[in-house]
Amino acid sequence: MKTRDELGKQVRDIWIEWAREQLNPKPSWFVPWESLSEPDKEVDRRIGERLFKAGMLEAAELDDGEDNFSSAGKSPYVSRETILAAANNLKKEGM
């Protein structure tokens, strides 16, 4: 599982990619993760964490006992069992 900082950095990278597509982007949209204030980093961490949790829950909901990940029964990143266990933990936490 990725750390909160890794998830936050990923959110920031996507934000900067989006900013490059805009006609009149604000300079602040291009500030790299390392230069963000701690409150701005925390926002990106929370966004990344929430999206990760939502993806885990969606993966668990897709599980119908069939092999939905690959012929080996695994995602390219983590095992099916790990995804399902994490999703069940999130459900218990009320996510």
Image (spheres, rainbow, N blue to C red):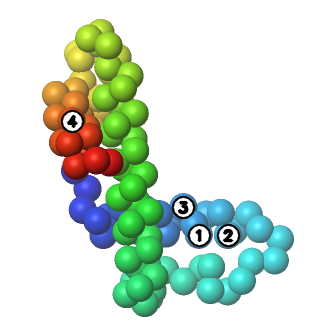
Q: Badge 4 is on which residue?
A: 88
Mark 4 vs mark 2: in front: 4
Residue found at the very far right of the displayed protein? 23
Q: Position of residue 9 (x, y in %)?
A: 40, 68
Dot 2 alpha-carbon crowd within 10 angstroms: few under 14, some 14 to 19, many 20 or more: some
- Of the numbered discs 4 and 1, the one sitting upstream in the chain is 1
Looking at this view, is 55 or 34 the one in front? Answer: 55
Find residue 19 and name its label: 2
Is 12 placed left or right of 26 in the picture? left
Looking at this view, is 38 or 29 the one in front? Answer: 38
Q: Is residue 83 visible?
A: yes
How far apart are the two marked residues, 1 and 2, measured between alpha carbons? 5 Å
How far apart are the two marked residues, 3 and 2, measured between alpha carbons? 9 Å
Contact flag, marks 3 and 1 (Cβ < 8 Å):
yes
Q: Position of residue 85 (x, y in %)?
A: 16, 34
Contact flag, marks 4 and 3 (Cβ < 8 Å):
no
Q: Amino acid at mark 1?
A: Ile
- Of the numbered discs 4 and 2, the one sitting upstream in the chain is 2
How far apart are the two marked residues, 4 and 2, measured between alpha carbons? 36 Å
Q: Residue at x 59, y 69 (%)?
A: 16
Q: Badge 1 is on which residue?
A: 16
Dot 3 alpha-carbon crowd within 10 angstroms: few under 14, some 14 to 19, many 20 or more: few
Q: Is residue 8 visible?
A: no
